Image (spheres, rainbow, N blue to C red):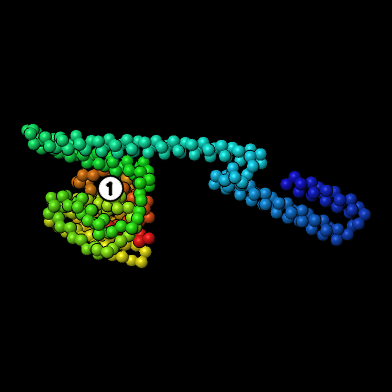
C-alpha cells in the first residue's frame, strides 16, 4: 500500500507539472487511467499477498510448517501461532490420557467388584434381612455396570478396541438373546427371531452384541409382562438392517431425538431403574464402527433399527 501511495503522489506531481505546459483534456484522461492502473496493480498484489498468508496459515494449522516453510521465513505472527498450537496439542494429549487412565481405572474397579458382590448375593439367604441386602446389592451391581459402560464411552476405549470384520448376523443375535434371556423369562416375555442363517455384515462381534443388547434390555425393561419382542434382519445392497420391535409404552415423539444422549431418561422411564447410559453407549459403538441406529415409536410400541455395513 505504501508503494501505491508513493506512485499516486509521483503521478499527481507529474500531472500538475505537465498541466502547466499542456492544458489538454487528454492529459486528465491519461492521469485518471494511470491512477486506476496503479490501484489495480496494488489491489492484485495485496490480494496475492493475503492469499499467500492464508495458505501459510492453513499449512501451519494442518501441521505442515516444518516440511514446507523454513523456520527463518516465518513471520512473528506465524511463530506465535505455531507455539500456541503446540501448547494446545500438548494440553489436549494430557487431557485425553487423563480421561483414558480414569476410564481404565473405573472399568477395572467395576470389574474387580463383581466377585465380592456375587459373594454377598450368595450369603444373603443366610441373613434374616436377606431380601434387603439382595436388593441393595443388585442396585450396587447395576451401578457398577453403568460405570463400566460410561468408562468405555468417555475414555476412548471403544475406538481403540473396535475391530470390525465380516461376521454372522445370526451369531450376533444369538449372543444378544442369550444375554437378555433371563430378564425376559422373568417377565414371561417371548423373544421371536427371524434372521437368515447366511446373513453377514462387517462389525465387531463383541462390541456390537453389547450395543444391540442394550436395545433388547430396554425393550424387555419397558414392555409389559407376557408380551412379545420380535428381532428380524434383512439384507440390502450396502447394509444389513436389524429391527427390534416391542409392545411397550412407546417413546413420545419429542423425546426420540434425545434418547441417545448421555444420562437422558424420558418420562416413561421414571418408574424403571436406569441412569441413561445404555442407548448412549449403543450409539457410540455403532457410529464408531460405521453403523447407524434409529428409533420410531407409536401407541403400539417402539422399533429400534440398526444398520450394519456389508463392506
Determine which residue is flagged by label 1: 278
Q: Quadrant of residue 99?
A: top left
**Residue at image x 44%, y 35%?**
94
| Above or below: residue 306 compared with residue 159 | below
Query: Left or right: where does residue 257 sit relative to residue 58?
Result: left
- Quick one: label 1, few (<14), some, or many (20+) residues within 10 Å? many
**Residue at image x 45%, y 38%?**
93
**Residue at image x 20%, y 46%?**
272
Closest to the observer: 185 or 108? 108
Secondary structure of the residue carrying numbered label 1: helix
Query: Left or right: where does residue 184 sit relative to residue 73?
Result: left
**Residue at image x 22%, y 63%?**
194
Spot occupied by residue 183 in the image (x, y as percentages of width and height): 16, 49
Closest to the observer: 268 or 183? 183
| Above or below: residue 102 compared with residue 181 | above
Residue 294 visible in this rendered orientation of the protein: no
Query: Left or right: where does residue 103 sit relative to residue 6?
Result: left
Spot occupied by residue 141 in the image (x, y as percentages of width and height): 21, 39
Residue 100 visible in this rendered orientation of the protein: yes
Count all numbered tags in the image, as a single digit: 1
Spot occupied by residue 235 in the image (x, y as percentages of width and height): 31, 65
Closest to the observer: 20 or 169? 169
Spot occupied by residue 18 in the image (x, y as percentages of width and height): 89, 53
Q: Quadrant of residue 290?
A: bottom left
In which quadrant is the C terminus drawn?
bottom left
| Above or below: residue 190 compared with residue 120 | below
Amino acid at each position: 500500500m505504501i508503494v501505491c501511495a508513493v506512485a499516486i503522489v509521483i503521478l499527481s506531481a507529474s500531472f500538475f507539472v505537465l498541466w502547466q505546459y499542456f492544458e489538454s483534456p487528454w492529459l486528465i484522461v491519461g492521469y485518471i487511467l494511470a491512477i486506476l492502473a496503479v490501484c489495480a496493480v496494488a489491489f492484485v498484489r495485496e490480494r496475492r499477498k493475503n492469499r499467500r498468508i492464508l495458505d501459510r496459515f492453513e499449512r501451519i494449522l494442518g501441521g505442515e510448517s516444518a516440511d514446507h516453510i523454513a523456520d527463518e521465513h516465518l513471520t512473528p505472527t506465524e511463530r506465535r501461532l505455531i507455539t500456541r498450537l503446540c501448547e494446545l496439542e500438548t494440553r489436549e494429549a494430557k487431557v485425553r490420557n487423563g480421561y483414558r487412565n480414569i476410564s481404565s481405572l473405573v472399568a477395572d474397579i467395576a470389574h474387580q467388584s463383581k466377585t465380592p458382590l456375587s459373594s454377598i448375593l450368595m450369603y444373603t439367604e443366610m441373613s434374616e434381612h436377606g431380601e434387603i441386602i439382595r436388593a441393595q446389592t443388585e442396585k450396587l451391581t447395576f451401578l457398577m455396570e453403568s460405570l463400566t459402560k460410561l468408562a468405555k464411552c468417555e475414555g476412548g476405549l471403544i475406538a481403540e478396541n473396535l475391530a470390525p470384520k465380516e461376521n454372522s448376523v445370526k451369531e450376533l443375535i444369538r449372543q444378544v438373546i442369550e444375554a437378555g434371556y433371563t430378564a425376559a423369562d422373568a417377565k414371561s416375555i417371548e423373544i421371536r427371531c427371524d434372521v437368515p442363517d447366511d446373513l453377514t455384515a462387517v462389525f465387531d462381534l463383541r462390541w456390537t452384541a453389547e450395543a444391540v443388547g442394550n436395545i433388547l434390555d430396554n425393550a424387555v425393561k419397558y414392555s409389559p409382562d407376557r408380551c412379545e419382542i420380535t428381532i428380524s434382519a434383512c439384507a440390502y445392497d450396502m447394509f444389513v438392517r436389524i429391527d427390534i420391535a416391542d409392545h411397550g409404552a412407546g417413546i413420545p415423539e419429542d423425546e426420540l431425538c434425545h434418547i441417545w444422549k448421555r444420562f437422558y431418561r424420558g418420562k416413561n422411564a421414571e418408574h424403571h431403574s436406569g441412569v441413561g447410559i445404555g442407548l448412549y453407549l449403543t450409539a457410540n459403538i455403532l457410529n464408531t464402527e460405521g453403523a447407524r441406529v434409529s428409533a420410531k415409536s407409536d401407541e403400539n410400541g417402539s422399533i429400534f433399527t440398526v444398520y450394519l455395513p456389508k463392506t
